[in-house]
Image: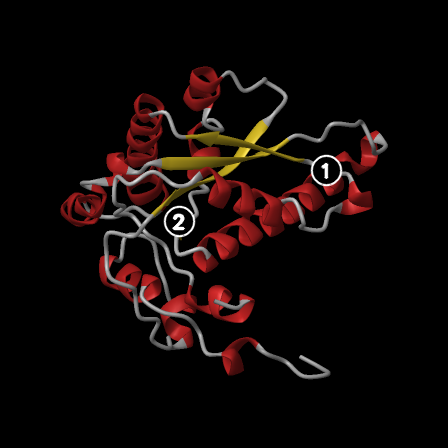
Amino acid sequence: MDALEALTTRHGVLRFKPKPVEPDKIKAMLEAAIAAPSPANLQPWAFVVVTEPSLTRHIAHYLIHVQKHQVFRALLDMPDDFTVKLMRLYESFDQTPCFVLVCLDPKVDFAQPQHQAALHDWYLVCRGAAMENLMTAATALGLGTRWFGGLALDGGGQPLKDLLGIPPEVEIVSITPVGYHDEPPKERPAQELLDVAGFKRGDSLALTRLLRGKLPLEQVLHRNRW
């Protein structure tokens, strides 16, 4: 699979076969991740790969809790009955054989105090590039992933930091499960702009439309001028 196909066919996966992910594939994903650009090549990332079953189950249950209580209920204000329906998608999530935690580890006190906030934003952008590289590589290797980024809604994932011994100064920014799909590929129909721009908290039908496709290129492309 070439890079363009991997980029355009990647989709979020929640159901995985319990088959372990081969160490060489995990290494290849991480090599792709650290090839991402970063400001002044400071490489402000660190990765925690978790494959021990007792720990992967703990991470899965924690992410389920965050999705249910912090994302679906608190952030999106979804009705309880719809939240219950959404959570059925996570019924076998604790079988996920591997998780990768993508962390922000600045490593050096690089900026003046007045520039720290801007540099932190820049760090998050390049960490996002690392995450995208990792997920694209996983797709090319026949693996499934899914971007979880709601930890900021739950105190930055402190329970996971305690569980895995992550230092206080290191920030967990996102997590992805990694494994072999146990679900069919998802289609990506074209969306209407109103599906995105018209979304309102608490609207379960609007959320269903929002999650099912992508805006066509013409809706987000401006040539030469806006």
Label 1 sits on a secondary structure element that is helix
Give the mark, 2 or 1, whose residue is nearer the N terminus.
Answer: 1
Figure check: 225 above or below 161: below
Few, some or many C-alpha atoms within 10 Å of disc 2 (few <14, some 14-19, many ≥20)?
some
Q: How far separated are the C-alphas under marks 2 and 1?
A: 28 Å
Image check: 191 left or right of 127?
Answer: left
Q: Residue furthest right?
A: 112
Identify which residue is drawn at 35% across, 58% down: 200
Residue 50, how many percent across, how many down?
43, 29
What is the number of the mark on residue 117?
Answer: 1
Q: Which residue is mark 2?
A: 146
Quadrant position of residue 139? bottom left
| The one of 159 and 142 positioned closer to us in this rendering | 142
- Tell me the residue at 42%/61% (across/down): 10
In the foreground, 122 or 3? 3
**Closer to the camera in the image, 87 or 11:** 11
Q: With respect to residue 28, does 112 lie above or below?
A: above
Q: Quadrant of residue 210?
A: bottom left
Residue displayed at 75% across by 40% down: 119
Please, what secondary structure does the residue beneath circle 2 have?
A: loop
Q: What kind of residue is marked 1?
A: Ala
The spot of residue 95 in percent (x, y) is 25, 36
Residue at image position (58%, 17%) is 167
In percent of width and height, residue 219 lies at 51, 79
